[in-house]
Amino acid sequence: MKTFFDSSAFAKRFVEESGSDAVEALCLSADELGLCVICLPEIVSALARRLREKRITAAQFAKLERHLLHDIRDVTLIDLTAEVIAASIVAIKASPVRAADALHVAAAKVWGADLFVSADDRQLTAARKAGLTAKAV
């Protein structure tokens, strides 16, 4: 199964929170994992915010960043192509979704994901409107 994770879901692999176990199980059961290229800077940004807020140490930040970079070695990264941008505009017009969230939906749609995974309810609704099977974590 081709499983696509948005940033809110994939980040649960690196920050223990509600849904982390479900994300891990979905990753292990997937035949292919897909991420939009914006997922990486979004997750690093979230980790950096935790560092600034002193919720993690610099050593923890470095370890989590290494873990992220290691984990994506076998992931399909979907680029921001003209087709993805066009599909994101369709998603924005169809649902009250932020531009970055629409890019994730569009990337999953263009990639041909069998499952779209997110922790964002509005994004999940947009994914379903785009014809994707969506799962909340």
Image (cartoon, grey):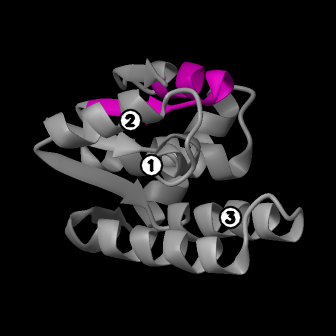
- Residue at far right of view: 53
Earlier-in-chain disc, 2 versus 1: 1
Q: Please name the amino acid that badge 2 sits on.
A: Val
Element type at marker 1? helix
Q: CA distance from mark 1 to mark 3?
A: 12 Å
Image point 60% across, 61% down: which residue?
43
Image point 89% across, 62% down: which residue?
53
Q: Please name the amino acid that badge 3 sits on.
A: Leu
Q: Quadrant of residue 124?
A: top right
Image point 47% across, 35% down: which residue?
20
Q: Residues within 10 Å of mark 2 (few under 14, many from 20)?
A: many
Q: Which mark is residue 23?
A: 2
The residue that mark 3 highlights is 47
Marks 2 and 1 in Cβ contact (< 8 Å): yes
Earlier-in-chain disc, 2 versus 3: 2
Q: Residues within 10 Å of mark 1 (few under 14, many from 20)?
A: many
Q: Please name the amino acid that badge 1 sits on.
A: Arg
Q: Position of residue 137 (x, y in %)?
A: 49, 25
The residue that mark 1 highlights is 13
Q: CA distance from mark 2 to mark 3?
A: 18 Å
Q: Residues within 10 Å of mark 3 (few under 14, many from 20)?
A: many
The N terminus, quarter of image = top left
Element type at marker 3? helix
Q: Is residue 31 left or right of residue 100?
A: left
Q: Position of residue 13 (x, y in %)?
A: 44, 49
Element type at marker 2? helix
